[in-house]
Amino acid sequence: MHLIWSKLALVVTTALGASTHDRLEVLYTKRLLFDRSGQPLVTVRLQQGRRRLWLESASPLRWHLRGGSEEALVTPPGRRWRITLEGVTPGTRRWWPVIERFSAADPQRTAAALARWRGKGLEARAFERGATLGLGPLSVDTRTVAVGVSPADSLRAAQRAGGGLPQFTGRVYEQWVDRPSGWVVARSDDGLEIRARDLLSVRADDEGQTVVLGGVPWRKQRDKTRRFGGLIDLLIGADGHLLALETAPAEQILEGTVPSELFPRAPAEALKAQAVAARGQLIARLGTRHPGEPYHVCASTHCQVYTGRTHLSDAATAAVRATRGALLVDAGGLTESVYGSACGGHTEAFHVMWGGAPDAVLTGRPDGPGAHSPHSEAAVARFIEEAPAAWCQPTGTRSGVFRWRVRRPGRAVSARIRRRADIGAVRGIRVLRRGRSGRAIVVRYEGTQGAHEVRGEHLNRKLLGGLKSGLWVARREGGHPDGEPDQWVFRGGGFGHGVGLCQHGAVGQAQAGWDYRRILDHYYPGARLERLW
């Protein structure tokens, strides 16, 4: 059933009632649905934190006023709709310091963990995230359990409370007690108005057409609009402002992801390898990255960059379609097909970067005929200064990511470290532990009033002013020998974490005549390709 609007100044108000078919409930429970071809329908966060935005389409628009209902309103094309919120009641949340994380495959372990922490007099709760998927012959289980204790009324309070627990993982789980509520209002530029309680959904009514979403600051895009071909959900975010989501089939999401993650002029075989890796990451991250939020993944680098139908590339689309449904699997199930920009000549081991048991596929390896593994501080310095031949060298050198050098004022480095620990002026930076690629994992900052150790490759990069990778060595320049230098000079290589597929390396291999299967075998040795839809 649908209604076609032709009159002006018509106001429609709908309260979305809760039911088993309530779209809002589907979003918050992250229920995974599939299309007729068997591919997952993925919900992506497009924008958040906006007070208003606008949308339009060259197609009639189909507005869904009650989730799961056949009833819809169809409005003529050519109108611009301004979206705002009214009468918002903020939701309430609790934040739980996480003290244990493990696979959800063993419910007895969950029960034992809860009993153990409750026996210590702490309020404890288990939170499950991730999904179980039956994809053809493969059963994928990405579920994990986070055990949280002693909830607080703010994120900062939970972090402080967690800091007093020796088992604190550094993570905090956000739990909704009451969701935010209010009216989502769409007003056209010629007087039409739609009001929906808590959620309003819209899509282009003509097949193949898109909805243009604007009024928001899209990164690196001057016209501040993007086009989307799926179902757009407009609702109230945790901050009480607009939250815009899109739900679309996985392959359609990938067509907007691949050209955003790898430059579309890359060789066809490199684009195909990227498509397979991105597909694996999309499936692996369904419901695992944003606990408590009503979407599966976000459209930023935190999950994978996604720009909808805005900047589609014929070459990237062809790569996605040529590898349709193809995923990497290994003895443990779905392969963790992570990827990064440039490894700098050596990839990193997954467990070194992010913890857990060693991964037989992602062990870290030299990335070229002349590359080798640096095993000492002197070897790391030589590896950076006398760069070996590597697959990512040609395009990485042109892009400034294969080898690089940056300076940081001594006072700026000291100020950043002081926010974590008051050790005075930083006069020494010493790497205590490096990964297999030479990336700095544990760093000791030596100050005039003490010392402080920081664990984590990415955290240390941020503390040092946003270094391109963790593959670096530091040198003092100027200043008193026993005090803070005038400058810290960092010489480094690569861009990103270095685990899995090296995008610049894949381009170099494709230019050398490798096909995408051989490229994938190089970066994920022991994994095999399976078409699952």
Image (tube, helix red, strand yellow):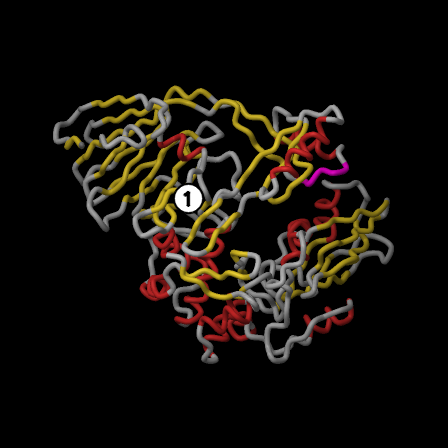
Does residue 275 appear in the picture of this structure?
no
Looking at the image, which residue is at 52% across and 27% down?
A: 176
Q: Quick one: SS at disc 1? A: strand
* Quarter residue 316 falls in: bottom left
Where's the C terminus, which quadrant? bottom left
Q: Amino acid at mark 1?
A: Val
Provide residue 338's location: percent of width, then percent of height.
54, 58
Task: In the rendered view, tell whether residue 269 sits above or below residue 167.
Answer: below
Report the front residue among 318 and 140. 140
Report the front residue among 97 and 90. 97
Q: Which residues are magenta?
A: 166-170
Confirm whether the magenta stretch covers residue 161.
no
Report the front residue among 72 and 446. 72
114 relative to 449 in the view: left or right: left
Looking at the image, which residue is at 44% across and 56% down?
A: 137
Task: In the rendered view, tell whether residue 523 sits above or below residue 306.
Answer: below
Confirm whether the magenta stretch covers residue 168.
yes
Where's the N terminus, which quadrant? top left
Provide residue 469's location: percent of width, then percent of height.
62, 59
Task: In the rendered view, tell whether residue 413 sits above or below residue 91.
Answer: below
Label 1 sits on residue: 44
Provide residue 273's location: percent of width, then percent of height.
45, 66
